Amino acid sequence: MEHKRSLLKLIDFYLVTDSVLSKKGTLSDVENAVTAGCRIVQYREKSRSTKDMILEASQIKTLCGSEAIFLVNDRVDVALAVDADGVHIGQDDMHISTARNLLGPDKIIGLTVHNVEEALEAERNGADYVGLGPIFDTTTKNDAGDGIGPESIRAVKDAIDVPIVAIGGINKQNCESVIVGGSDSLVAISAVVCSDDVARETKDFIDIIKQFKE
Ligand code: 3NM
């Protein structure tokens, strides 16, 4: 697991799955993104049974192999069932200390935060990275709220040492501002999974991020 944890420092483009928006399906999206160089995948599935999720999660784990970190959104039980590399949880999910107790010290836990205070608390409570968003307005997550703007990233970056993953309304046109703004990596869901060519979009994001990263 130390190998996977050390990859966290290197991540640039971060894939979050969305079976509703996906054009080619979740497994195809993961395979294409990983082949294109994506080093972290979060399985985010809100519409399938637990049984189906466990089956799909084990297939995604295989596709990630030793190259990409594999996290499960919200569902600590599914992460445990397939021995995923960790979870990504939100402010309204179980407390991070509860997730840590269930998963043990070696698993990766990411937490969604919206401001400096939540980021500091997440780091204090042992988050391995924070997801910061929504950076821009998004229709992908109904309850995401208004975009905080890329200029809000720097204060969070200056306050914490763990990596920041920016999320929400990010596309190829605005992603430069997110990286220059101080984010270590970024998620773009609709900009990637709604595409006919997920590998191409992933590669484009990775190239742009590398170009603008400090
Ligand atoms: N979480 P898109 S925004 C899953 O702000 C999610 O925490 C968010 O999708 C947050 O890249 C979001 O299509 C959806 O805007 C991001």
Image (spheres, rainbow, N blue to C red):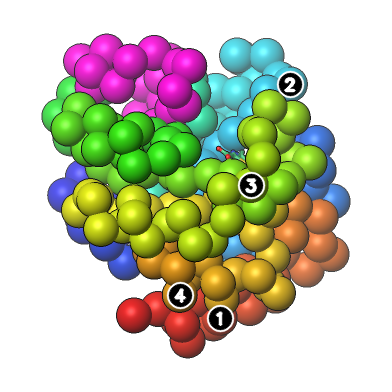
Query: CA gap, disc 2 to disc 4?
Result: 35 Å
Residue picked out by circle 2: 47
Residue picked out by circle 1: 208
| Mark 2: amino acid | Ser
Q: Quadrant of ligand 1?
A: top right
Residue picked out by circle 4: 180
| Mark 1: amino acid | Ile
Above or below — where is 71 with respect to 148?
above
* Residue ranking furthest to the bottom: 211
Above or below — where is 25 with respect to 212?
above
Give the mark nearest the N terminus, 2 or 3. 2
Label 1 secondary element: helix
Q: Closer to the observer: label 1 or label 2?
A: 1
The answer to the question of whether label 1 and label 3 lie on touching residues, with beta carbons closer than 8 A, is no
Characterize the local packing of mark 4: few (<14), some (14-19) or many (20 or more) Cα atoms within 10 angstroms.
Answer: some
Characterize the local packing of mark 2: few (<14), some (14-19) or many (20 or more) Cα atoms within 10 angstroms.
Answer: few
